[in-house]
Image: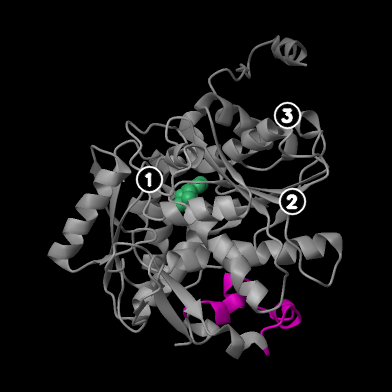
Amino acid sequence: MHLDLKCSLTGESYPVDQLQNLSAQGKPLLAEYDLDAIKETMTPQAVRARNIRSMWKFWELMPVDSPEEAVSLGEGCTPLLQANRVGPFEPFENLFVKDESFNPTGSFKARGMSAAVTRAKALGVKAIALPSAGNAAGAATYYAARAGLECHLFVPEDTPPANIVESKLGGANIYLVNGLISDCGRLCREACDQFGWFDLSTLKEPFRVEGKKTMGYELAFDLADHFGTETLQLPDVIFYPTGGGTGLIGIWKAFDEVEALGWIGSARPKMVAVQADGCSPIVKAYLEGADSAPLFPNAATCASGLRVPVAVGDFLMLDAIRKSSGTAISVSDQKLMQGTEEICRWQGISACPEGGAVWKAAEQLMSDGWLSPEETIVLFNTGTGLKYNHLFKSDDIPRIDHEGENWMKILEQQS
Ligand SMILES: *Cc1c(COP(=O)(O)O)cnc(C)c1O
């Protein structure tokens, strides 16, 4: 295999042909590719010309020897949509939404699971297990089903019903835990030791981040396509809804890789980590100037993807935010719910609450003067709004009696 696994703290190497979780220091392992070897053949033109309609069109930068090895459901290649300058979006001249709701099982968790399940299967794994706050459970279930693996899920009791139902339906063994995602992580680890399952917790195995990094490659192509340029382009600012931070770390890694391939220069977007007020360990650590983020007590937010009180990749996220001259900001649940509705009704994009959060953070930083109107800004809408029906009221919809006489009056009152 054309890659090495290195401890993200010490740089120490680990064999790639064996199953790996954390390094001896308890830190994530990251894949390092022989970029010189692929530089000649893997050009942007070559990638553009491929007829692979998934993130596996970047297969040389992924843990496979050929694209046929991938356990794929067509993940990635999601649209980058420019926001209409209407309503609250009016001030933004170059605002884009990378709409990850298009992925299999409706969230960008598909990218990570496709890569991780591909590698686990190749190494002979029969059963995977993970803790999840929601979308990871659904994605793991369907990639495991596709690969013929057993799947065990530990989820907090307050996980969105849609995620629980889809996992059950997809044949996973799902366990409801009366605790937080961090408690689920502990139970999962103990069960893996006991039963010999492979722990697919994010950043505790090396390849979910490899799947999510493909969002960084795609952005460079998407923007070049939008602006009609041959050379790849990155935005000025990226807003990322941050839970475990896998995507943020992955996208940052992707930029270094494609710079080494000569696809882009040394300029980088400012990386903005967005969290919810009720669970903002990374924002707190960033504001305090710390380089790690301890457990955030009593974590609570309706944006389940952001309900991650402690993250093993904390130091990597904080490093990326600072090196990029970015920032970290949190928004209230009330704000992020309002933001979700605004994206839905002004842009026609099915937003998840995490997407609502990044939009409200961008609006806030624009009114603070941290952003300027002409900057190219990308918001990640990381999943479909359909998974969050339980959060939105629909009991104020007018009812019509089909045998009644005055139903037209109801319409008149509405308009
Ligand atoms: C998991 C998840 C996130 C957080 O992603 P990380 O890369 O782990 O930080 C954000 N939004 C949604 C919808 C998610 O499912």
Say whether mark 1 is within 8 Å of ligand 1.
yes
From the image, state whether disc 1 or disc 3 is nearer to you: 3
Q: Nearer the viewer, mark 3 or mark 2?
A: 3
> Going by the image, does 258 lie left or right of 65?
right
- Which residue was labeled with disc 1? 133
Is residue 390 rendered to the left or right of residue 257? Answer: left
Place of residue 120 in the rendered image (x, y in percent of width and height, measured from the top left): 35, 74
Q: Secondary structure at mark 1?
A: loop
In the rendered view, tell whether residue 81 sits above or below residue 146: above
**Picture coordinates of residue 296 (x, y %)?**
36, 37
User: Which residue is labeled 3 in the image?
Assistant: 367
Stretch in magenta: 40-63
Tag 2: amino acid: Leu
Residue identifier under label 2: 81
Residue 87 in which image quadrant: top right
- Give the mark nearest the N terminus, 1 or 2: 2
Q: Quadrant of residue 213?
A: bottom right
For residue 21, side relative to residue 330 (left or right): left
Q: Please, is residue 7 above or below residue 34 in the view? A: above
Estimate the spatial distance between the alpha carbons at disc 1 and disc 2, rounded to whole Å: 27 Å
Residue 62: percent from the left, percent from the top? 51, 77
Residue at image point 13% right, 63% down: 194
Could you say where residue 329 lies in the image, as x and y percent from the top left? 56, 36
Q: Quadrant of the N terminus?
A: bottom left
Binning the other alpha carbons within 10 Å of mark 3 as few (below 14), some (14 to 19) or many (20 upward) gives: few
* Whether label 1 touches label 3, CB < 8 Å: no
Element under disc 2: strand
